[in-house]
Image: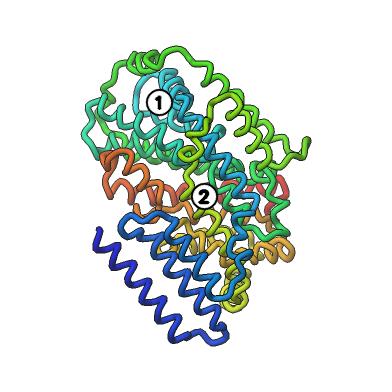
C-alpha cells in the first residue's frame, strides 16, 4: 500500500510535468496548462497522501502554484470567504461539544436501550441515532467517532468474530445511519456547506435551509432506509444475536446522571437547529446562527480556549477553502471556458428529461470518482458554471442538481474512494468488515440511491421542483 501511494503520486507528478512542458491542449493558454499541472499535483497529494501528509499539503501546492502562474490571490483564496466555510467552522465546534460533553454517546445508548436486543432492532436503532445526531452536528467524522466504538463494543460483547457477517452488519448499519440520512438538510452533513461554496454567486440565494430540506430530505431519507435495510437483509446471520436484554440498560446507567453541561449543550444545539429551520421568518443567515451558537457555548464554558485548536479540524477547513476556490481558479485561468464546449453539450443533452439527467450525472460521477477521489470536488468545481444554465434554460433548481452531485460524491465501490470508510477503519482498527463487505455495501448504496431518485421523482413533481 505504501509503495502504491508513492507510485500513484509519481504518476500524477509526471503527468503534471508533461502537461506543463508540452502544453498539448489546443486553445488552452499557457497559464491554463500550468494551473492544470498544479491541480494535478494537488490532487495527487489529496488522493494518495504519501507519507500520510495532511490535506494542507495539497492545499498549499494549489494556492502557491496558482498564484505563481498568474491567478490573483483574491481568486485563489475566494473559497475562504464563501458562506459555506462560515457554516463549516462553527458546525465543527457544535459537533465537538456533542462529543466532549458525552451527549452524543448518551443519545446513542438511550435509543439502543429502548428496544429488545436483536439484529433488526439494532439496525433500526442505528438509523434513528444517525438521524438524531445529524440534526445536532453536520460533522460525519464526529458522528462516526460516537457510533463506531459503540458498534465494536456490541460486536465484542455479543461474541461475534471480527470481520464476520454479523460484525459487518452491525458496523455497516451504524455507518450508513451516520453518513447518509443527514444529507437531507443543509446542516446535516458537510455536503451542505460544500455545495453552497461551489454554487455560482447567482445561485447561492436559492440554497436556503428550507429549499435544501424540501428537495433533499425525501431522497436521502429513502436512500438511508434502503441502504440500512438491504445491509440487514443480505448480511444477517442465521444464528440469533447472543446479547442479554439488560446489557444496553446497564451501559446507559454506567454513564451516570445527565450533567448540566449536557443539558446546556442540548438546549443550545436544539436552539441552533430551530434557527436554521426558521430562516425564512427571521432572515438571519445560517452562518450567523451557527456562529451565535458557538458564542453561547463559549459563554457557558462548554468550549474553552484550549478547545479552539482541537475542536475544529483545521486541516479539513483549509482543504474546504482551497477546494471551493477551484471554481474561480478554473474560470480565471481559462480552463472552464476551454473545456465547456467538450462537456456542456453532453450534459445538457439530457437536461430536457430531468429524471434521466439526474441518473446519468450520478452514474457519470461514479466513474469519475475512481480518479477524483476527494468526493469528486474537482469535477463539481469545474462544472459549477452549468448550474446557471440548468436553472435558467431548463428550470432545474441548483439544489435538485446537487442531489446527483452528492449521490456521485458519496459512492464507494472501493474503500479508497470513500474517505468515511477509511475513517471508520481507523476507528475500529480494521476489525469491522472485510473488502467483500465494503464492495457489497458500495453496490447496495448504488442501488439505494438510484431507487431513491426514481421514487422521489413523484414527490418532486408534486412540489413543482421536477419539470
Which residue position is annotated with label 2?
Answer: 317
Q: Quarter holding the N terminus? A: bottom left
Q: Quadrant of residue 247?
A: top left
Question: Within 10 angstroms of label 1, few (less than 14), some, or many (20 or more) residues?
Answer: some
Residue 350 visible to the viewer: no
x and y percentages locating residue 58 in the rendered image: 44, 61
| Horizontal side, residue 338 vs residue 363: left or right | right
Residue that sits furthest to the front in the current view:
305
**Residue at image point 64% right, 38% down:** 291
Residue at the location (30% across, 46% down)? Answer: 437
Where disc 2 sits, the SS reads helix
Q: In front: mark 2 or mark 1? A: 2
Work out which quarter of the rendered image holds the C terminus and state it: bottom right
Q: 227 or 314, which is in the foreground?
A: 314
To which residue does mark 1 refer?
Answer: 121
In the picture provided, is 61 more to the left or to the right than 285?
left
Task: Give whichever of 59, 104 is nearer the camera.
Answer: 59
Residue 33 visible = yes
At 49% from the left edge and 41% from the top edge, which residue is drawn?
312
**Picture layout, residue 329 above or below residue 188:** below
The location of residue 360, given as percent across then percent down, is 53, 62
- Where does residue 309 sit, x and y in percent of width and height? 48, 40
Amino acid at each position: 500500500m505504501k509503495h502504491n501511494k508513492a507510485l500513484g503520486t509519481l504518476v500524477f507528478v509526471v503527468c503534471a510535468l508533461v502537461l506543463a512542458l508540452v502544453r498539448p491542449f489546443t486553445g488552452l493558454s499557457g497559464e491554463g496548462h500550468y494551473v492544470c499541472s498544479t491541480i494535478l499535483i494537488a490532487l495527487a497529494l489529496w488522493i494518495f497522501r504519501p507519507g500520510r501528509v495532511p490535506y494542507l499539503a495539497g492545499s498549499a501546492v494549489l494556492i502557491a502554484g496558482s498564484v505563481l502562474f498568474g491567478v490573483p490571490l483574491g481568486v485563489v483564496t475566494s473559497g475562504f470567504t464563501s458562506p459555506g466555510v462560515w457554516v463549516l467552522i462553527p458546525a465543527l465546534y457544535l459537533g465537538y461539544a456533542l462529543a466532549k460533553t458525552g451527549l452524543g454517546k448518551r443519545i446513542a445508548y438511550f435509543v439502543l436501550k429502548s428496544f429488545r436486543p436483536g439484529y433488526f432492532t439494532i439496525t433500526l436503532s442505528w438509523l434513528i441515532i444517525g438521524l438524531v445526531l445529524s440534526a445536532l452536528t453536520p460533522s460525519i467524522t464526529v458522528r462516526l467517532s460516537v457510533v463506531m466504538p459503540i458498534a465494536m463494543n456490541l460486536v465484542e460483547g455479543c461474541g461475534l468474530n471480527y470481520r464476520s457477517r454479523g460484525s459487518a452488519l452491525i458496523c455497516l448499519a451504524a455507518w450508513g445511519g451516520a453518513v447518509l440520512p443527514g444529507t437531507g438538510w443543509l446542516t446535516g452533513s458537510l455536503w451542505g456547506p460544500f455545495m453552497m461554496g461551489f454554487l455560482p454567486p447567482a445561485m447561492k440565494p436559492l440554497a436556503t435551509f428550507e429549499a435544501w430540506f424540501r428537495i433533499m430530505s425525501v431522497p436521502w431519507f429513502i436512500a438511508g432506509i434502503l441502504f440500512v435495510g438491504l445491509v440487514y437483509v443480505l448480511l444477517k446471520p442465521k444464528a440469533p444475536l447472543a446479547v442479554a436484554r439488560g446489557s444496553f440498560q446497564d451501559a446507559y446507567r454506567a454513564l451516570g446522571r445527565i450533567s448540566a453541561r449536557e443539558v446546556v449543550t442540548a438546549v443550545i444545539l436544539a436552539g441552533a437547529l430551530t434557527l436554521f429551520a426558521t430562516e425564512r421568518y427571521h432572515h438571519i443567515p445560517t452562518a450567523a446562527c451557527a456562529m451565535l451558537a458557538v458564542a453561547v457555548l463559549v459563554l457557558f464554558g462548554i468550549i474553552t480556549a484550549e478547545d479552539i485548536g482541537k475542536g475544529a479540524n483545521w486541516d479539513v477547513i483549509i482543504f474546504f477553502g482551497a477546494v471551493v476556490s477551484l471554481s474561480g481558479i478554473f474560470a480565471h485561468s481559462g480552463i472552464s471556458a476551454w473545456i465547456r464546449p467538450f462537456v456542456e453539450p453532453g450534459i445538457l443533452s439530457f437536461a430536457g428529461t430531468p429524471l434521466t439527467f439526474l441518473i446519468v450525472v450520478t452514474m457519470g460521477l461514479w466513474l469519475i470518482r475512481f480518479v477524483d477521489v476527494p468526493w469528486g470536488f474537482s469535477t463539481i468545481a469545474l462544472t459549477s458554471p452549468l448550474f446557471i444554465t440548468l436553472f435558467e434554460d431548463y428550470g432545474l433548481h441548483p439544489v435538485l442538481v446537487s442531489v446527483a452531485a452528492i449521490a456521485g460524491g458519496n459512492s464507494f465501490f472501493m474503500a479508497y474512494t470513500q474517505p468515511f470508510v477509511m475513517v471508520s477503519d481507523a476507528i475500529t482498527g480494521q476489525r469491522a468488515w472485510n473488502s467483500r463487505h465494503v464492495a457489497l455495501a458500495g453496490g447496495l448504496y448504488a442501488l439505494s440511491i438510484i431507487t431513491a431518485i426514481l421514487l422521489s421523482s413523484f414527490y418532486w413533481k408534486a412540489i413543482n421542483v421536477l419539470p
